[in-house]
Amino acid sequence: LIENLGGKVAIITGASSGIGEATAKSLADEGVAVVLAARRKDELESLADQIRANGGDALVSPTDVTSDADIQELVDRTVDEFGQVDILVNNAGVMLLEEVQDADTENFQQMVDVNLSGLMKLTHAVLPTMQDHGAGHIVNISSVAGRKSFPGSSAYSATKFGVNGFSEGLRQEVTGEDDIRVTLIEPGYVNTELAEHIPDEERKQQTKEALETMESLTSKDIARSITYAVGQPKHVDVNELLIRPTHQE
Ligand code: NDP
């Protein structure tokens, strides 16, 4: 189903939990050297230990994607250590659901900074190394909320609609002589820590209930889709994958 990914190098943001962590494990299992980026260093170190114990190669690079300096350091360290970046998984994200009228505008700012600006700036920082190498794959994690908006998800959806717009424009920009691919992943309900940070208590409970009542997706389900997309032959660009639990409306 997939090509040999051995020897490739991937940066994964938000690797300290959930989808990012599962993606790092899945890519490492395929022989990809993984660079683990997020703020929680201890979680990254323990994931790197697990990957190494299984024979994989992992580098920890504590990163806050809202910091320009951290973004540059992440790319520089990766290139210093491995010489290239073949795959970038822009996965770091926060989902601070609340209705616009009740919202703390700092939460708007945080979602824009992490989900959208961080993703755009890291892409901007990584692209030159991919262009030098003549190949690369950028995987952007959007959401069902990047296609539809709901009460309480206005600002979160604004960032994810932004990710979709950015990804399609980028795809058209880089399509040309280089083998640079762009893939958009749009998960439905995935059982992770994401809902823990929802500021509106009622909405937090509703989201957790929805996650528990239906058979929601696991991080591994999404990691498998990402691994499938990056594992296709270089003339195949899986542009978009929308993945819902079977019982999600
Ligand atoms: P988690 O909360 O488990 O993971 C979020 C990750 O983002 C963490 O590793 C966190 O690490 C990281 N992160 C948050 N802020 C920053 C920051 N400023 N700098 C660097 N990293 C940061 O949730 P998921 O795994 O579910 O989320 C991953 C992605 O999937 C997100 O983009 C989310 O929007 C998307 N998604 C999730 C869905 C779901 O139902 N769970 C559905 C659709 C999309 P740390 O705190 O250590 O920095």
Image (cartoon, rainbow, N blue to C red):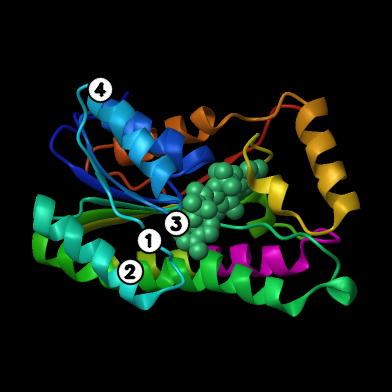
Amino acid type, residue under disc 3 in the picture: Arg
Residue 163 drawn in magenta: yes
* Mark 2 → mark 3, Cα distance in angstroms: 12 Å
What segment carries the magenta color? 150-165
Amino acid type, residue under disc 2 in the picture: Ile
Amino acid type, residue under disc 1 in the picture: Thr
Tell me residue 19's x, y (percent): 50, 40
Q: Secondary structure at mark 1?
A: loop
Q: Are marks 4 and 1 in contact (CB under 8 Å)?
A: no
Q: Secondary structure at mark 3?
A: loop
Instruction: Tell which circle, 1 or 3, labels the residue nearer the N-terminal end.
Output: 3
Mark 1 lies within 8 Å of ligand 1 (Cβ measured): yes
Query: Residue lying furthest top in this view?
Result: 54
Q: Are marks 4 and 2 in contact (CB under 8 Å)?
A: no
* Mark 4 → mark 2, Cα distance in angstroms: 28 Å
Instruction: Tell which circle, 3 or 4, labels the residue nearer the N-terminal end.
Output: 3
Q: Which residue is mark 1?
A: 63
* Mark 1 → mark 3, Cα distance in angstroms: 5 Å
Residue 53, numbered label: 4
Residue 86 drawn in magenta: no
Q: Which residue is mark 3?
A: 39
Between 43 and 161, the residue placed more toward the observer is: 43
Amino acid type, residue under disc 4 in the picture: Ala
* Mark 2 → mark 1, Cα distance in angstroms: 7 Å
Instruction: Tell which circle, 4 or 2, labels the residue nearer the N-terminal end.
Output: 4
Q: Are marks 1 and 3 in contact (CB under 8 Å)?
A: yes
